[in-house]
Structure formats: structure tokens, C-alpha cells
Amino acid sequence: MARTARELLERTAGKLAPDPHANRLLPLIARGAAQRSTLTALALEQGHVIPADRRAFLHLAERPDTGPDGAAFFTELAEGEAVALDRLAAYADACGADEERRAAYEPLAGCQSYPAYVAWLAMNGSPADVVLALTANFAAWGAYCGTIAEALRHHYGFDDEACGFFDHFAEPAPELRQRALAAVQEGLGADRIDEDRAHHHGRLLQAYETAFWHALWEQDQRVA
């Protein structure tokens, strides 16, 4: 049994690290082989994911069973999603997705399973467990974004403004990490963390993350 938040976060991240080959789309983007229509779909899917996640994080911050440190963590996540949504517009514009195209877009079920589960966690998960599960998942997402930002610049000719959405998530976030540590320690102190349950949540988050990329990969293969 982990005695500190740092031990628990590190152990959870290790157990939930994704298979490096699970994301089939990422290598295509990394070498500039993904279809531009797939890059556009990525922008349009995120246009649905980000607002949904932001509302889920705000709900978690406001739940009566969320401690002060947990509320601070979820509030910062929600604020980060608001920044990301602003930056997403530049990426969507660079992909040629104007307001009319965004409004008409029909999202893929495989892509939207991730925010649907985050919303489920916001309603049903123990907030301390959710902190642990989300933090473990963010490491993989941040690494994906770093790879995509580099590829967009080198293979697709996107400028810094267009890459800002991915840069935002790829950048180190030491303050958020400290808030996560405080929130997990708060949960440990109040005996509100069930490690097995948190791992269950984290495993499903990783599975839905993989489903997001797989749905886009399948679409890319149909176009190729």
C-alpha cells in the first residue's frame, strides 16, 4: 500500500502506461502520412471533447464530496480546457474547418466514448479516485500531443498558432502536478482512495483513449 501521494501516482502511472503500439494513427501523423482530412476530423472531434470534459471537471470541483485540494485540481483542469478550446479554433481554421463545417460535423462514436466516460466519472466516481485515474492518463495524452505538434510543423506546414492546441497539452505542467499530489494526499488522509477502483477507472480511460485514435485511424484508412 502506497503511503504517499507521489508513490501512488507513480505506481498507478506505471501500471496504466499504454502499449506503445496501441495508437495506430500517431505513427502516420509523425511521418506525415496521415490524410489531411483526418487532421481535420481530429480538430472537429476535439471540438466536442474539450467542452464536455470542461463541464465534467467543473462538476467534480463542485461536488460536496470533493475536498478543497481536489476542487482546486479539477478547477485548474477546467481552466486549462478553456484555454485549449480557444487554441483549438486556430488549429481548426488551419485545417479548413470553418464554422459551417464544424456545425455540420457528425462526431464518431469511437472518439466520443472518452468524454462520455469522463462524464460518467464526474457523476459516479469518487473524486479522489478520479484524480488518480486522470493523472495517469494525462501522461500518454501529453506525449501524443508533443509528437503531433512536431509533425504538424515539419510535415504539414502548420505555424505556431495552429499548433498551439497541441503545444498546450505537451508542455510540462508542474503546478497541475502539485495540485494532483495534494488532491491524492488529501484523499489518502481521508481514506477516500480505493486503489483498485482507481486502476479500474484508469484502465477504462486508457481503453477509451485508444478507441479515440483507432476511430480516426480507421477513417484515415478508408480515405487512403
Image: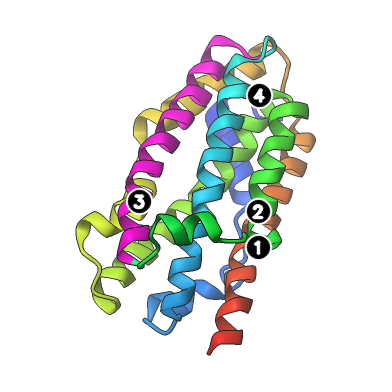
151 relative to 128 in the view: left or right: left
Whichever of labels 3 and 1 marks the residue nearer the N terminus, that label is 3
Bounds of the magenta segment: 66-94
- Mark 4, Cα crowd under 10 Å, few <14 / some 14-19 / many 20+, is many
Q: Which residue, given by chain and number where applicable, does mark 1 sit on?
A: 108
Q: Residue 212 placed where, x, y %?
A: 62, 61
Quarter-of-image position of residue 110: bottom right
- Mark 3, Cα crowd under 10 Å, few <14 / some 14-19 / many 20+, is many
Q: Which residue, given by chain and number where applicable, does mark 3 sit on?
A: 89
Whichever of labels 2 and 3 marks the residue nearer the N terminus, that label is 3
Q: Is residue 128 visible?
A: yes
In 3D space, how far apart are the residues under numbered discs 2 and 3 (Cα atoms)? 19 Å
Q: Amino acid at mark 4?
A: Ala
Res 112 label: 2
Residue at image coords 30%, 54%: 90
Going by the picture, which residue comes out furthest to the front? Answer: 100
In 3D space, how far apart are the residues under numbered discs 2 and 4 (Cα atoms)? 24 Å
Going by the picture, which residue comes out furthest to the bottom? Answer: 224
Res 128 label: 4
Q: Residue 63 placed where, x, y %?
A: 66, 15
Residue at image coords 58%, 66%: 213
Give the label, 3 or 4, closer to the camera: 3
Magenta highlight on residue 88: yes
In 3D space, how far apart are the residues under numbered discs 3 and 1 (Cα atoms)? 19 Å
Q: Amino acid at mark 2?
A: Gln
- Are the residues flagged by discs 2 and 1 in contact, CB closer than 8 Å? yes
Q: Amino acid at mark 1?
A: Leu
In 3D space, how far apart are the residues under numbered discs 1 and 4 (Cα atoms)? 30 Å
